[in-house]
Amino acid sequence: MNDDYIEYQNKVIYMVTSTDVTYEATKEGCRNYLNSTGPWATFKEYLSWNDSYKIIEINEQVWELSECSCQYWEKNYICKHVIGISFKLSKFDTFPALDLNIEQNSKRGRRKIASSALQRNSTESGRLQNANTISLK
């Protein structure tokens, strides 16, 4: 990661390619990505172009305030790209012990149809029967 950054709009940014593409990130490719407004024929083409690179802006003072263009960062304000680049730049001494569900594998077996919160307890059924009875006098 020595000098593998791009200066863009007075900011130092790092870029990585998505796992969906087969090419590596080069400085020329990254500059073309940042400066292009390309003629996309469909929205699907635009989405594939937009997801081809991830833009990471590292905060020099506090690495936790760094930003990334991936969808996971947009929801959680932390992602594997920020952690990886910060680690390569030696922004922290020990690897952070964060509780992240980044690319978690699915659990074995069939998924539950209803959780226990949605199931009726046996004591409630008696109260519901009493509530449903109407006496006409």
Image: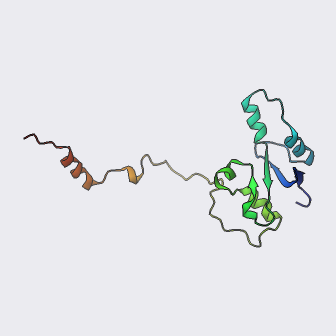
Residue found farthest to the top: 41
Residue under the point 87% across and 49% down: 9
Please name the colour scheme applied to the rendered image.
rainbow
Q: Position of residue 13 (x, y in %)?
A: 84, 54
Q: Is residue 78 left or right of residue 24?
A: left
- Of residue 41 and residue 67, the one placed in the foreground of this image is 67
Residue found farthest to the bottom: 93
Residue found farthest to the left: 137
Q: Is residue 89 left or right of residue 105?
A: right
Residue under the point 73% across and 61% down: 65
The quarter in which the C terminus is drawn is top left
Q: Position of residue 114 (x, y in %)?
A: 42, 48
- Of residue 59 and residue 129, the one placed in the foreground of this image is 59
Q: Position of residue 102 (x, y in %)?
A: 65, 55
Number of labelled discs? 0
Q: Position of residue 23 (x, y in %)?
A: 85, 43
Q: Is residue 115 left or right of residue 55?
A: left
The quarter in which the N terminus is drawn is bottom right
Residue under the point 35% across and 50% down: 119
